[in-house]
Amino acid sequence: MGKSYSIIFLCIILSSCNMGQKKTYSAEEVTTESKKVNDFLDRKFDEYVARYPEIAASLGLKTSYDSWNDRTDETGDKELAIFRANVDTLKKFNLNSVDEQTALSVRMYEEDLQRIEASRKWRHYDFEINQLQGAHNDLPVFLVNVHKIDSVKDAEAYLSRLRKFDLVFSQTIDNLKKSEAKGIFPPYFTFKYVTDDVKNFIKGCDAKDASNTLLTDFSSKVEKLNIDKAEKEKLIAEAAEIIKTTVKSSYKKLLDYWAQLEPKAKAKGSNGVWNLPDGDAYYTYMLQYHTTTKMTPEEVYQTGINEVARIHNEMRAIMKKVNFKSDSLHDFFKFVRTDQQFKYANDAKGRQQLVTDAHDYIDSMKIMMPQLFTTLPKAPLVIKEVEKFREKSAGGAFYEDPAEDGSRPGRYYVNTYDMSTEPKYQMEALTYHEAIPGHHMQIAVAQELKGVPKFRRHEFFTSYVEGWALYSEKLAKDVGKYKDPYSDFGRLSMEVFRAARLVVDVGIHTKHWTREQAIDYFVKNTANAQKDIENEIERYFIWPGQATGYKIGMIKILSLRQRAINELGDKFDIRQFHEVVLTNGAVSLTTLEDLVNKWIEKVKSKTKSAVS
């Protein structure tokens, strides 16, 4: 009996051991299963893009080219259901037999679902119309910058989109009403900006000059077509009529509702999201969404306090370098804000000088790129001035992605509306941030990745994307840029601006800071112009948590680089480090840390093998 039980026990042990062993797969099996998973993910991405015409067009496609995205809750619900079904299907593949990149793709796809699910609780908490974004600005910007007219069919699709302004605006107003029912109102200061923009657009609908933004755009594109003059005139006349009627009435409808909403928003005031229902929980969610960390508001706040103090010390070193007469940092801020040597002329010559300077900084950085990167972007980059119709409310500078098919370059926009807000000493760092090695480098490289599912070429995480751009400002310093100490001060002034955001964003949304308190903190701790500061502060009210992603992302990338340097010593290669950071596309900071750690271990393992 004892011997029989011993045999049975031994069999159980052996069986358990076999069950615990991970099966090994042949290279062919790994390749086959990985391809199945990637093909599935690509099909689902194509289906997703086909459901959203604006996304399709931004990728250079003309799918449903005559339509707009549907903005209803019903579409959002369907999208979530589709995503859940896709993840369930993914689990049916043999995920133990896929390669590392495919496993990473599955992990990221599942993370995307988690982010979508988490967002559903906060539906209609975002301020759908504000001074920075909303259908009133987004639709014209899209038509001007994205909708190409290469044929009569494309022109007719443009006309169709003009006719459908009313549908989009109706959906937008419905969403605003749902926010209103929840007690969600934009900060009161937003109303004047939006009202002015909408009124100006309505006025332009009847104009026969450049103030009629859409007619000017449509006409210029149609004129380039190789068709009869009479047909061109017919198309342009039709566009003029639609703009005077349908488009104009759509804006008037929005304006009427906006006017009804204004007194209710006035009663709520201009406060952070703490003033919204369950606002503290919402802010914690937004903070973690944008930083992709578990940092608490207080941790973010203290990080900002510490970073501001550190950067101020570096600024004081520059004050000594330029022999500034005072020891006061505040005096130095006042000096660079007001001294004419740091200002572009507020005329055509000054605007041209700003654009020329940006070109020069890009050209000088291009020479350094092979020292820093193995993979370089193929997409071209152009510099453009912000269009007249949105220059008043747009930011000082920003970047827009190239089309994946190469039909549209990456665009580095500079705002020349008020030259006093674009100091010369910041232009170098600003250009590295928005162009190369910043946004254009990161986004174009991601779009051009090979061997990964399409969705990964278009992922977006604030802390990664903006963290990389801010890191790029410092990277330029590492390779000898900012020869002019005032330009180096400009770099620090932009960095302290991002550090101060950590303090102010949390201050506004959890510590009940007023707009004036937030402005005062920036005036005391940064060198930016008053109007620039006011615009930025108002942005933080609108996009809670978003502004914190920049510095948190930069800190993480720098810390990962330092860890790699410490552990690899003379085996550290900055180009290999950047290859790991950039050639997986945009990822969460947690995923980025895992990728860098794996790379460090791989390099160390190769070194040990070579020694042995």
Image: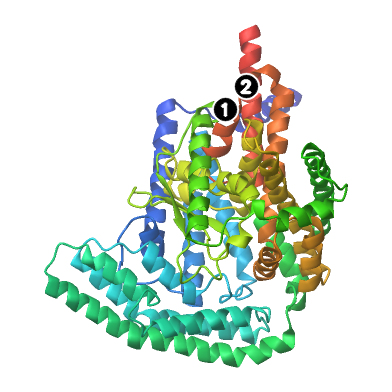
* Residue 168 or residue 77, whichever sits in front: 168
Q: Earlier along the polypeptide chain: callout 2 or callout 1?
A: 1
Label 2 sits on a secondary structure element that is helix
Q: Residue at x 79, y 59 (%)?
A: 503
Farthest residue in the right direction? Answer: 327
Residue 285 horizontal/vertical position (percent) = 70, 63
Distance from the alpha carbon under mark 2 to that under mark 1 = 10 Å
* Residue 611 or residue 502, whichever sits in front: 502
Q: Which residue is mark 2?
A: 603
Q: Quadrant of residue 418?
A: bottom right
Q: Label 1 crowding class (10 Å Cα cut-off): few <14, some 14-19, many 20+?
A: some
Horizontal relation, residue 49 to residue 597: left or right? left
Q: Which numbered dot is residue 120?
A: none
Q: Label 2 crowding class (10 Å Cα cut-off): few <14, some 14-19, many 20+?
A: some
Q: Quadrant of the N terminus?
A: top right
Q: Quadrant of residue 216?
A: bottom left
Label 1 sits on a secondary structure element that is helix
Q: In this view of the protein, can residue 491 be seen by the observer?
A: yes
Residue 157 horizontal/vertical position (percent) = 27, 71
Q: Amino acid at mark 1?
A: Gln
Q: Residue at x 40, y 39 (%)?
A: 378
Q: Which residue is mark 1?
A: 576
Question: How many numbered callouts?
Answer: 2
Residue 24 horizontal/vertical position (percent) = 52, 27
Q: Amino acid at mark 2?
A: Val
Closest to the camera, between mark 2 and mark 1, is: 1
Q: Is residue 416 above or below residue 260?
A: above
Q: Residue at x 65, y 51 (%)?
A: 341
Q: Residue at x 70, y 87 (%)?
A: 266
Coloring scheme used: rainbow
* Residue 290 or residue 130, whichever sits in front: 130
